[in-house]
Image: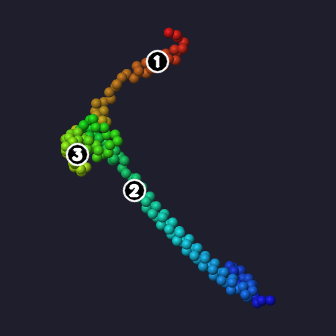
Amino acid sequence: MPDMKTVVLGDKAVQVADTDVALIEQYKTDMARKLTDAESKHAAAIAAKDEDIGKLRADLATAQAAANIDVDSLVAARSELVGQVKAMDASIDPKGKTDAELRKAAVLAKLGDSIVKDASDAEITGMFKALAKDAATTNPVATALRHGVVNVGDAQSLADKALATANADLNAWRTKK
């Protein structure tokens, strides 16, 4: 019978043949190395994921900061610009136009194509500011409040007429013309 040696596997001690001890110890060493390699790869993967999470959090913070715009001030500035443009030329339609396009259209309407064709946006903005200070702006809400509500028609008579028409249409089948 071969000599027996005690080998520790995990938390147990076992008796194995003397010839198998070297194989078992080599196996334990290989497994310990593979475990260390797997743990280091796992740690590197976690670190890479943490870096990605950090980048995404920074991008999110940047996007949230960009989204925190003051809509009220933007609306007020746009309304003021449209009022100034309408004061210069009421035929200019502001729908679908940028602020720069509105300023250019107003300057074009006031000064003509020869002034505007070679001008940069900054020059057009300066011309617009000079023209806008002379133009009287109109505020439609202030005008409505100043002049009061204007009745366009008698609502009760229109409602009565609509009811009579509806009743006549409802009873049309009863009377033949």
Say which residue appears at 51% left-offset and 69% top-offset: 47
**Observer-nearest residue: 147 or 20?**
20
Amino acid type shown at disc 1: Thr
- Figure quadrant of residue 31: bottom right
Is 83 positioned to the left or the right of 70 in the image? Answer: left
For the residues carrying marks 1 and 3, which lies nearer the camera in this image?
3
Is 3 positioned to the left or the right of 109 in the image? Answer: right
**Observer-nearest residue: 97 or 153?**
97
Is disc 2 placed on a helix, strand or loop?
helix
Q: Residue tagged by mark 2?
A: 65
The percent position of residue 137, horizontal first and vertical second, equals: 25, 39
Which of the two discs, 3 and 2, labels the residue nearer the N terminus? 2
The percent position of residue 45, horizontal first and vertical second, equals: 53, 69
Is disc 3 placed on a helix, strand or loop?
loop
Q: Residue tagged by mark 3?
A: 117
Amino acid type shown at disc 3: Lys
Q: Residue tagged by mark 1?
A: 165
Say which residue appears at 30% left-offset and 33% top-offset: 144
